[in-house]
Amino acid sequence: MAAFLDLFLPSFTMLFVTMDPIGNMPIFMSLTESPRPGYRLLMARRSVLIGFSVMLFFAYAGEAFLNLLGISIPAFRIAGGIMLFIVALQMIFVEEQKEKAAEEASDHPYENDVSVFPLAVPLIAGPGSIASIILLMSERHGDWRQQAFVIGSLIAVCLITYVLFRLSNHFARLFGQTINTVISKLLGIILGAMASQFIIDGIYGLMS
């Protein structure tokens, strides 16, 4: 119990806040709107698996990988912010194009695939969550038991994310097309603000 409170809970809290599965659920619902049966389920499964794999990679090799490339965490935040901002613009201004693409989608399971970008990266495995997992693992460098608690908390957050993504289908049917469109536009604005904050924080980090 003490190990849970001292090791697992702090890691879980940090990853849950930065990965934000609750906040990502309506964004997932908006980005995966499609007439194709099973599309949303496929995107939920693939995005969480890919996001988890990216987080796991950075957990064990992230700090060395970024240092090897000469990339700082602030620079990574700026890049992630720019990508998110592009997604936000698409959610606000090109909804009609997205609907047309969905209507013309074939039965190919990987067409119109949003599981890698923007769902897995940067929404699930974003600059904040990647920075968090690198920090958590570096603080426990050399202690495999404490690092196991960090990985366990990562698995728990990813499972919660998957469950919420699965439930988003029920929310989509409950709200209806009109409300879903309004939510998409509002979330696009919010996502744009989040992206701007990522960029601002990255610039501030480079200057400090």
Image: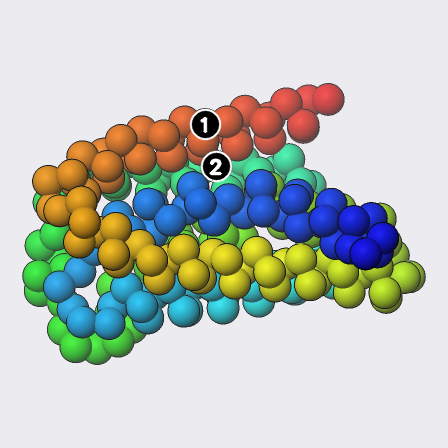
**Residue 149 can be seen in this image:** yes
Q: Earlier in the sequence, mark 2 or mark 1?
A: 2
Q: Tag 1, which secondary structure?
A: helix
Q: Is residue 66 left or right of residue 17?
A: right
In the image as oriented, which residue stretches furthest toward the right?
142
**Residue 122 can be seen in this image:** no
The label on residue 81 is 2
According to the picture, the residue beneath numbered tag 1 turns out to be 196
In the image as oriented, which residue stretches furthest toward the bottom?
108
Q: Is 92 drawn above or below residue 154 in the view shown?
A: above
Quadrant location of residue 194? top left
Residue placed most toward the observer, 32 or 122: 32
Identify the residue shown where x is 43% and y is 61%. 163
Q: Are marks 2 and 1 in contact (CB under 8 Å)?
A: yes
Identify the residue shown where x is 32% and y is 70%. 42
Residue placed most toward the observer, 171 or 121: 171
Amino acid type for the residue under numbered disc 1? Ser
Q: CA distance from mark 2 to mark 1?
A: 6 Å
Q: Tag 2, which secondary structure?
A: helix
Amino acid type for the residue under numbered disc 2? Gly
Identify the residue shown where x is 63% and y is 58%. 154
On-image quarter of the C terminus: top right
Q: Is residue 200 left or right of residue 175?
A: right
Q: Is 178 drawn above or below residue 61 in the view shown?
A: above
On-image quarter of the N terminus: bottom right
